[in-house]
Image: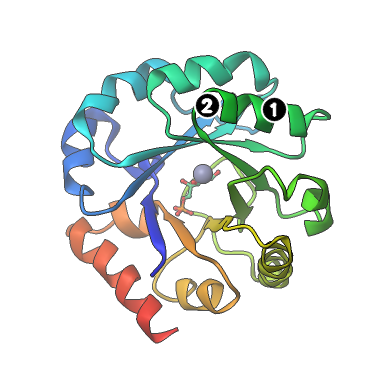
C-alpha cells in the first residue's frame, strides 16, 4: 500500500492547525520549503515547521527547494523533520549532504526535477532513503502532471530493485485520482498530493480515495 503525503502548500495558511487535524489520517505530512532563488516562489520556513510539530503525529517529510541547502540541514532537523529531501540539481556534494542528513537522525531524500535524467542518482543509491520524482517543475502547487516523467519512475524503480535496498520511491506534482494509478503502476510507493487533497471539502475521503486506487493499480 503506498504512503500518502498531503502537501501543506495547498492548505489554508490562515488555519494551519486545523488543516493538520483534517489530514491526520495520512501517515506523512509533506512540507515544501521554497526560497525564491532555487525555485521561483517563497513558501514557509523552519519556524513554521517547528510551530506545527506538536500538532501532528505524522512523519514530517520536508522537501527543501533552497540553495544553498547545507547550512539549513541542522535547523530543519531541529524544527522536527523526520525526513529531509534535497535536490540533486543544486549540489555538487550530494553524497556528503545525505550523510549529514542521516547523522542528524533523519531519513535522507533526494528530489529529481523533470529535466534531470535518472542516472544522476546512480552514485547515491547506497545512501538515499527516499527518491522523490518531480512530476511538475518545482515551485507551485496545482500544476498539471508531466506524462514525460513516467519512464523515469520506471527506471528508478528498476535501479532501486537492483540496489537491493528498501528505498521509498515518491512522486510529487499533479497527483490525483487519474494520475495516481499510473505512477503506482510505474513503481511509485509514495504519493505527494497537495491540491487534490486540500482542494476537496472532505480531505479524509480524498486521502482514502488515493489509497483505494492503489488496490486496483
Ligand atoms: C511543488 C511541490 C509540491 C506541491 C504539489 O514544487 O513540491 O509538493 O505542493 O502540489 P500538487 O499536488 O497540487 O501538484
Ligand atoms: Zn514537494
Quarter of the rendering containing residue 71: top right
Q: Is residue 190 left or right of residue 17?
A: right
As drawn, 176 above or below 73: below
Quadrant for the N terminus in the image:
bottom left
Q: Position of residue 52 (x, y in %)?
A: 27, 26
Q: Is residue 4 visible?
A: yes
* Residue at left offset 39%, top offset 76%: 214
Disc 2 to disc 1: CB gap under 8 Å: no
Instruction: Indicate the secondary structure of the residue bearing disc 2.
Output: loop
In the image shown, does 80 or 182 lie closer to the viewer? 80
Residue 75 numbered mark, or none: none
Q: Label for residue 97?
A: 1
Pointer 2 residue: 42
Q: Is residue 206 left or right of residue 6?
A: left
Foreground residue among 99 and 30: 99
Q: Quadrant of residue 13?
A: top left
Which element carries disc 1, helix, strand or loop? helix
Amino acid at each position: 500500500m503506498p504512503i500518502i503525503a498531503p502537501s501543506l502548500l495547498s492548505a489554508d495558511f490562515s488555519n494551519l492547525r486545523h488543516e493538520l487535524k483534517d489530514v491526520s489520517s495520512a501517515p506523512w505530512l509533506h512540507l515544501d520549503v521554497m526560497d525564491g532563488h532555487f525555485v521561483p516562489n517563497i513558501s514557509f520556513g523552519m519556524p513554521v515547521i517547528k510551530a506545527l510539530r506538536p500538532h501532528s503525529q505524522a512523519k514530517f517529510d520536508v522537501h527543501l527547494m533552497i540553495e544553498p541547502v547545507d547550512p539549513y540541514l541542522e535547523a530543519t532537523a531541529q524544527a522536527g523533520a523526520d525526513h529531509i529531501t534535497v535536490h540533486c540539481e543544486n549540489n555538487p556534494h550530494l553524497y556528503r549532504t545525505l550523510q549529514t542528513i542521516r547523522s542528524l537522525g533523519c531519513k535522507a531524500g533526494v528530489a529529481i526535477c523533470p529535466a534531470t535524467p535518472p542516472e544522476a542518482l546512480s552514485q547515491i543509491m547506497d545512501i538515499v532513503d527516499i527518491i522523490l520524482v518531480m512530476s511538475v517543475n518545482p515551485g507551485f502547487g496545482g500544476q498539471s502532471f508531466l506524462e514525460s516523467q513516467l519512464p523515469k519512475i520506471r527506471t528508478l524503480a528498476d535501479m532501486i530493485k537492483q540496489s537491493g535496498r528498501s528505498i521509498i520511491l515518491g512522486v510529487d506534482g499533479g497527483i490525483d485520482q487519474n494520475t495516481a494509478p499510473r505512477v503506482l503502476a510505474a513503481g511509485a510507493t509514495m504519493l505527494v498530493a497537495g491540491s487534490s487533497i486540500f482542494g476537496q471539502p472532505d480531505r479524509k475521503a480524498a486521502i482514502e480515495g488515493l489509497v483505494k486506487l492503489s488496490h486496483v493499480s
